[in-house]
Image (cartoon, rainbow, N blue to C red):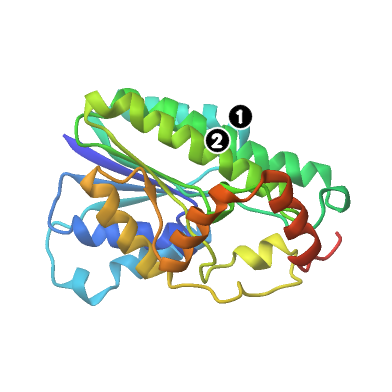
């Protein structure tokens, strides 16, 4: 029987690193299979080929199969597409879901009144609705030892001005993930929220609509993901923070009033963005 690892937003950044590192951990295990999901098929294929061309992979027999799945998982319609995929695969053969990494998501910089409402609603659809739905669809196929990793953010610990909807969506992800971890403890399913701060990915370019090409002071996605897999695998860490600075920020947020935090970041943490 196949043991499936599912990673959304797997074509770049943190999602790609999850795919690469989890693949490397499962090399030689022919019962392991990967589903890499994103909208851009060409970039998914590039990611797949990059993983398979690693020196460590070329010397191993019985490599896990990697399936690249071009799919828009956004909103309720996206969850239905994912459910159809799971059911089609189940009708064809037996499998369980070993790991689900909900990484797909995006943010927008700028005051709420100056950002397109359609974009903010799409963010909620992807960051919250899709993540929740994929967890619900995947759970019946999970067994003791299975893992769910939901990518939240350091922004989840406090309301943020100039980042209002993104921080709110990630606050939802964090709250939902911790509650899910509590509910699934007796079933032996490990659930963790990864809460990264600035990581060197394409996030800032998307969030700023091209005004900021790179995240400032971004940390290594390789190190962030490696730390997350170590902590999530232990089953004892429902909230995963890598750097000492991130841990300190999350801790200190407990002593900052919600309005005060939002007002301060609105006034003093301006984020560049372009209007469409």
Give 70 or 98, whichever is nearer the viewer.
Answer: 98
Residue 77 is labelled as: 1
Q: How many numbered marks, from 0 up?
A: 2
Give 200 or 130, whichever is nearer the viewer.
Answer: 200
Measured in 3D between alpha carbons, the distance from the residue under mark 2 to the one under mark 1, in whole angstroms, is 9 Å
Determine the residue positioned at 82% across, 48% down.
112
Q: Position of residue 194 (x, y in %)?
A: 42, 51
Chain-order first, disc 2 or disc 1? 1
Give the vertical position of 143 relative to 250 (above or below): above
Residue 12 seen in the figure: no
Determine the residue positioned at 26% across, 32% down.
189
Q: Position of residue 84 (x, y in %)?
A: 46, 27
Please, what secondary structure does the residue beneath circle 2 have? helix
Tell me where residue 122 sits by quadrant. top right
Give 206 or 263, whichever is nearer the viewer.
Answer: 263
Q: Position of residue 181 (x, y in %)?
A: 35, 32
Q: Which residue is mark 2?
A: 130
């Amino acid at each position: 029987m196949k043991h499936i690892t599912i990673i959304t937003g797997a074509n770049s950044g943190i999602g790609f690193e999850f795919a690469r590192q989890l693949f490397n951990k499962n090399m030689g295990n022919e019962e392991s299979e990967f589903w890499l999901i994103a909208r851009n098929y060409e970039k998914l294929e590039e990611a797949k080929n990059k993983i398979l061309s690693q020196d460590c992979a070329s010397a191993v027999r019985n490599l896990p199969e990697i399936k690249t799945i071009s799919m828009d998982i956004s909103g309720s319609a996206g969850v239905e597409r994912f459910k159809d995929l799971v059911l089609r695969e189940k009708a064809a053969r037996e499998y369980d879901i070993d790991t689900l990494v909900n990484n797909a998501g995006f943010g927008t910089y700028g005051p709420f009144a100056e950002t397109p409402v359609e974009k903010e609603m799409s963010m909620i659809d992807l960051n919250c609705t899709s993540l929740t739905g994929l967890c619900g669809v995947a759970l019946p196929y999970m067994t003791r030892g299975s893992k769910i990793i939901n990518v939240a953010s350091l922004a989840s610990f406090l309301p943020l001005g100039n980042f209002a909807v993104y921080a709110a969506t990630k606050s939802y992800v964090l709250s939902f993930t911790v509650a899910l971890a509590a509910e699934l403890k007796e079933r032996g399913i490990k659930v963790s929220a990864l809460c990264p701060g600035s990581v060197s990915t394409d996030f800032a370019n998307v969030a700023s609509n091209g005004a900021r090409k790179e995240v400032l002071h971004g940390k290594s996605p390789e190190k962030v993901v490696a730390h997350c897999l170590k902590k999530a695998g232990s089953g004892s860490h429902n909230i995963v923070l890598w750097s000492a600075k991130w841990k300190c920020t999350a801790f200190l947020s407990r002593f900052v009033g919600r309005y005060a935090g939002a007002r301060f970041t609105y006034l003093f943490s301006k984020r560049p963005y372009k209007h469409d």
